[in-house]
Amino acid sequence: MRDAYIIGAGQTPFGAMPEESYRSLFTAAYEEAADSVPDGFDDADVDEAVVGSLGVGGRQLGLSGPAATEHAGLHGIPSSRVENACAASGYAVRQAVQAVKSGMADVALGGGVELMTDMSSDVTKYWLGVSGETEWERLTGTTFSGVYAQMASAYMDEYEATPEHLSMVAVKNHENGAKNPKAHLGFECSLEDAVDAPVVADPLNLYHCCPTSDGAAAVLVASEDVVSEYTDDPIRVAGVGAASERVGLFQRDTYTAISSSETAAESAYDQADIEPAELDFAEVHDCFAIAELLAYEDLGFCDRGEAPQLLEEGRTELGGDLPVNASGGLKSKGHPIGATGAGQIAEAFKQLSGKAGDRQVEDANVGLTHNVGGSGGGAVVHILEREVAR
Amino acid sequence: MRDAYIIGAGQTPFGAMPEESYRSLFTAAYEEAADSVPDGFDDADVDEAVVGSLGVGGRQLGLSGPAATEHAGLHGIPSSRVENACAASGYAVRQAVQAVKSGMADVALGGGVELMTDMSSDVTKYWLGVSGETEWERLTGTTFSGVYAQMASAYMDEYEATPEHLSMVAVKNHENGAKNPKAHLGFECSLEDAVDAPVVADPLNLYHCCPTSDGAAAVLVASEDVVSEYTDDPIRVAGVGAASERVGLFQRDTYTAISSSETAAESAYDQADIEPAELDFAEVHDCFAIAELLAYEDLGFCDRGEAPQLLEEGRTELGGDLPVNASGGLKSKGHPIGATGAGQIAEAFKQLSGKAGDRQVEDANVGLTHNVGGSGGGAVVHILEREVAR
């Protein structure tokens, strides 16, 4: 099995851009990725592409992979769309890694795109609804905020956690996002704001929920055989784990852990041969504030029930020992469904390249990204490592 | 790059089964695939799964991969959905092959499913419509039959071909499909029937168009390191090629060739190190009769413009030197979008295993499958070879 490396990554600003198309957004992200390759990059070097997208709105479903890559100037290559709800482009990058490791591609592009703000919120709600368990869960009226609200209630019931802990996630991530020029909600918020916000699905309030965003992200993966043509500072995919879980929450053994995240993380740590304590930073899937608390525990940053303490001690803040969501996370940076997973990897690439500006994590050599589909039906974890220590 | 082998494959009957769900259909196909493994198979051996589906009707979009595989008894493994319009499960099997070649899986499942007959034809038309080029082609009112009708017109204008040649495709494929107990339209038709049928999109008539079907198919792929645990008669994936093309017909250089099919086939032949003349049989993507004529030329079975002659000489009939669509093809066997590509490979597995009953191709040792997305926006070609000659 040969090694795979991230040689470039790009991301559009996340936000409301109803004047754009999935084609224009994906092209912009790809172009930034190509431009970010340290020693230069030629479009003709892309052997294969995988585009993550839920296709919200249904304007182009079939063949949106080839349609997006052709528009980006990549004509003729194998190109397809992968979908795993909100984990679509985390899986797309994983597939690009597989293509490279398989020997079938020397350079593969994994990315994603979603356009969500050019339609009524009822339409968006439908499309997000059919990404949850439809037959047995959605048709009873449960939305994603409702599902995560049940997880939050169960967590607060089981452990020493309060709604204020959920608000602390929002405060931290908005503080980081305010330093990210590409964030959708790039402003700070006070704990008071994040506690007193209107209820969305009790106990979750407005500040406990990520926004609906447009955007795209793209990641270029190269094999060990060609990586030196592109960079002297290779960033290795040290581990990549993925797993599934029952799609309906009601089908599971517990509401206070996401087994797909646990399994994906264990697999990634094993491959990378590192412990969670060795990570310098992480981008985790905080679609709702409770999801970030669960992620701390599912990914092994702390024991079960200890996530609130991690927050209280400020350990996951930008200056802490394990900064989480330096980008602002889904909460502040935004969550264009199909672009989120690749966007996390684009952030990790920036951090590992030392180019993250005001939100740069000091001595960033090993980072983890964690992308979840739905309420945990799918999860994918990447561990990226700089080979040349700074 | 390690070798990949098909160790088992299954397919539900194709047809109108509105009482089924995507879960029940996929499970039935997987169970048949597992049962077909010569030396037995344990569900726990599946390391990874990829499910091809367009998701027609939109009942379960996000996470339909994990939802389908969990129902089939495969809980917890990496599972995702791949979509490339009608080439969805050809790509899904290719991804399973990549997973195995990459070393990330020893056994991977690639399959697909589609449920299309439990909704009004207007809904189906919408979902097929957004699989063609939407922004610039579908919104002007063109349907898939309209797109292929333009290709047929151009072909008859450029070469010595008549509508009767299109009808000869239908006669041949129905004759084969009548021998396939799993065919949707498993009856014979006369040339007269196939010539005098009502027009759908001039010059295409009813017999020049495949039906709208429900169904599922599943293929088990194993690495060279474990294949001997499952079979003494290994069927090697000798070559797998894939390519894309501009999604809109109007964007292309020609209407009488599909460049993605050509490129995918060249790549597969190169890997397998064989010439088209060495094939014992082929399953090609005959969504419309003109597509089978183009396939003969795109796949190198004959030169440009010579496809009608191949038909006239009966060379692609079951007793000919290169039987094409012994299964009945999309025309007679049926075309449940997301299941078609994996269904072709399931047929090839049956043929290479000598278990195709009345439609068995004699001395079947090397076969090709050809799966097209839309009107050629994507294409994928597999070449399968028995290692133990009969």
Image (cartoon, coloured by chain):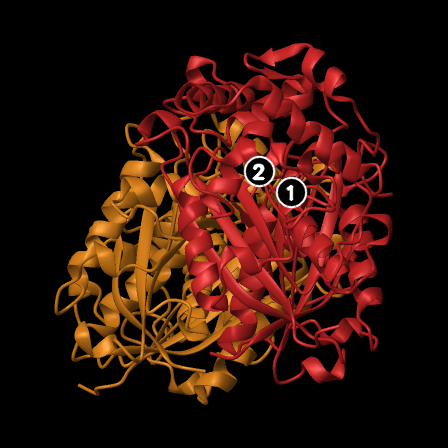
Chain colours: A orange, B red
Dot 1 alpha-carbon crowd within 10 angstroms: few under 14, some 14 to 19, many 20 or more: many
Q: Chain of mark 2?
A: B
Image location (x, y in percent) of residue A324: 37, 68
Q: Is residue B178 visible?
A: yes
Q: Are marks 2 and 1 in contact (CB under 8 Å)?
A: yes
Image location (x, y in percent) of residue A214: 35, 39
Secondary structure of residue under mark 1: loop
Image location (x, y in percent) of residue B268: 47, 60
Residue type, numbered disc 1: Thr
Residue at mark 2: B310
Q: Residue sitting at 47 percent across and 48 percent down?
A: B300
Residue type, numbered disc 2: Leu
Q: Chain of mark 1?
A: B
Q: Nearer the viewer, residue B311 or A8?
A: B311
Q: Nearer the viewer, residue B263 or B76?
A: B263
Image location (x, y in percent) of residue A223: 33, 75
Q: Is residue B100 above or below residue B152?
A: below
Residue at mark 1: B316
The picture quadrant where one finds residue B187 is: top right
